[in-house]
Amino acid sequence: MANIAFEVVGRLRADLVAYSKPNMAAKRTVIQIFPSGVKGSVDCSELSSLVLRAPYGTRVWLKTTAASSWQTCAWRCIAVIEGSAVPSARKTGFPGVRVPDLDRLDGPDAKSTDREMESTYPMVESPDDGSGWTFGRVGEAPLKGRVVAIRLESPWSTGADEVDEAAEVATRELARPVPPTLTPVDTVVAAPRATVRLERVDTPEGALDDARRQLQVWEAEGWSVVSMTRDGPQALLFLLAPDANR
């Protein structure tokens, strides 16, 4: 078999944990999605159940073909929706959903599939007809071990204008004089459907390792870098637009 192909639409930080057997059992593979790309891979034959942790509004499409006509084959959509997700146990973590069997319908918080309930996920004619936290199309063969492509859609994938507007607001804030001794700066600027966080990192010129490490921490927390500006010999300014911290 081959590895599943991943497509990410919009800025997104998420984790997808794949299991080779139902009920989140057997081989476990963690796929990390960052604004900069996807880290990790999983073979098609090793996805039978999964756990998704992502910002509210994220949608994941499991496809059994990579062709443009994928809607005519078996597929399933899984969404992280408020009221139909497991809240994060950590303040900075993501909500999530559990799918103990790709071919069966269980609650988004289920840790194992209910074998007494012979029920599959809601079926729709096309992706546009779907609603709720999961829906799809059932094929002649099961989804388990047959998913060849996964598309992840960020809540921001259709909100580029709002993010751009937030970036403009934050850019104006950055233009204001800031005492060079004031570090770090942690300012949150609100804009329609977006929030921009401003940070100042005190870093000696030529020694950027600390700044890069801090940048990786922010990305891991779900913040996407919009711009980076030098502000004197001892400071870096990071303009960050969050995908998950709103």
Image: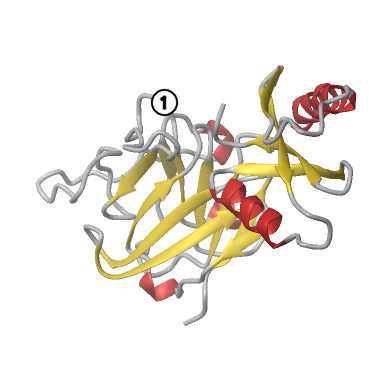
Residue at far bottom of view:
1
Place residue 160 in its image quadrant: top right
Indicate left or right for 130 with 22 as reference: right
Where does label 1 land, which residue?
82
Quadrant where the C terminus sits is: top right
Judge from the rendering whether residue 118 lies leftward or rightward of residue 96; answer left or right. left
* Residue 212 relative to residue 141: left or right: right
Residue 1 image point, x, y percent: 47, 82
Image: 45 above or below 108: below
Mark 1 closeness class: few <14, some 14–19, many ≥20 residues within 10 Å: some
Can residue 102 be seen here? The reply is yes
Q: Which colour scheme is used?
A: secondary structure
The residue under the point 39% across, 59% down is: 17
Percent across and percent down for residue 73 are 51, 57
Compared across the picture, whether 84 is left or right of 107 comes to right
Instruction: Tell me where residue 188 appears, x and y as whole percent.
Output: 66, 23
In depth, the one of 102 and 11 nearer the eye is 11
Q: Where is residue 104 in the image (x, y as percent from the top left)?
A: 27, 49
Q: Which residue lies furthest to the front in this view?
A: 181
Secondary structure, mark 1, is loop
Q: Which of 187 and 57 is in front in this view?
A: 187
Q: Three-letter amino acid code at disc 1?
A: Glu
Residue at 55% of width from left, 31% of height from top?
245
Is residue 1 placed above or below 84 in the rendered structure?
below
Name which quarter of the figure residue 231 lies in. top right
Q: Is residue 148 above or below residue 137?
A: below
Q: Is residue 36 visible?
A: no
Along the line of sight, which residue is nearer the eye, 90 or 104? 90
The residue at the point 78 percent across, 54 percent down is 204
Along the line of sight, the residue nearer the viewer: 85 or 140: 85
Q: In percent of the image, x 31 and y 37: which residue is there? A: 89
